[in-house]
Image (tube, helix red, strand yellow):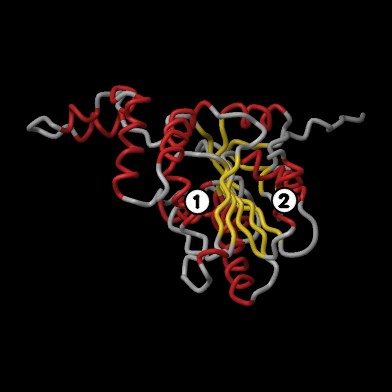
Amino acid sequence: LDGDTLSGQLQQHEQVLCVVNSRKSAQEIFTRLSGEGNFHLSTLMYPAHRRAKLEEIRRRLQEGLPCRVVSTSLIEAGVDVDFPSVYREEAGLDAILQAAGRCNREGRRPTEKSVVTVFRGEGGVPPLFAAAIGAGREIMAHFADLTAPEVVHAYFTRLLDLKGTQAQDTHHILSLMQSEMFPFRTVSERFHLIDSPTVTVYIPEGAGAELVQRLRSGERSRSLYRQLGQYGVSIYEQHFSALNQAGDLERLEDGSVLLTNLELYSEHTGLSLQADSGKGLFI
């Protein structure tokens, strides 16, 4: 499905969830929707912002109001929502089953009316998901009941075959954990849940503005940083460099990074992936 076709299908549903593989896709598909009750969720929105949106989404679902949500996979991680229809961009079988868990989650609708549509996006297969998508395609082509334990086992076995066990443990952490004296420090230094380096940018909006002001004034405490985490957005190095070069960021003495151009943060889609390069200096 291309973006226009997908958004057109979503528009026909009063309540629907669409889960895609990238933050860029989530923003692009959301902007194609029209009318009331459309929502976007991704990690380009700071946690407190996402939490507020989720509360509104749950309210609209319960009251039967229009509610179309375009989200990245974050909504699959323990978020309790119940949609009559779900669209999931092609991914690994585990991700597809997680998305399916948001369709008729409370069992209040007939099964035949609770449809999960798995679609192939127009952007091609992201390298990060290539092995998972490949294993998922093979398994879905050979089994009817994708939720059966033996099918899930077959999927992960095939995924390991495609990736290789060494690719799963490039820093040899598993062998370290099998030693008699558990090397906590070494494992801690080698282990990163997400290998791609990111930079956290604090967004001085709402209560975040007061927290940022405390940081500017020189306050440093574990409590302050914990609260600031609710107003932080993690971005990749190239995104950070573009924003920094455009003069949209400020780095404080403690290394904290603040967004200074709040026009780049949207109430609907969070932090823009495009730096503001249109500034001019007039003397």
Asked which quadrant contains residue 171, the reply is top left
Residue 274 position, x and y percent, is 72, 35
Dot 1: few (<14), some (14–19), or many (≥20) neighbours within 10 Å? Answer: some
* Position of 102 relative to 91 (above/below): below
Quarter in which the N terminus is drawn: top right
Mark closer to the chain start, 1 or 2 = 1
* Position of 198 relative to 152 (above/below): above
**Kind of residue indicated by mark 2:** Ser
Asked which quadrant contains residue 189, the reply is top left
> In the image, 35: left or right of 194?
right
Q: Is residue 216 visible?
A: no
Q: Nearer the viewer, residue 146 or 187?
A: 146
Asked which quadrant contains residue 63, the reply is bottom right
Residue at image coords 46%, 45%: 95
Residue 210 position, x and y percent, is 60, 58
* Mark count: 2
> In the image, 233: left or right of 7?
left
Residue at image coords 76%, 48%: 31
Q: Residue furthest bottom?
A: 63
> In the image, 126: left or right of 249?
left
Quarter in which the C terminus is drawn: top right
Residue 266 position, x and y percent, is 72, 50
Q: Secondary structure at mark 1?
A: helix
**Kind of residue indicated by mark 1:** Gly
Q: Is residue 21 visible?
A: yes
Q: Residue tagged by mark 2?
A: 266
Q: Nearer the viewer, residue 10 or 28?
A: 10
Q: Residue tagged by mark 1?
A: 229
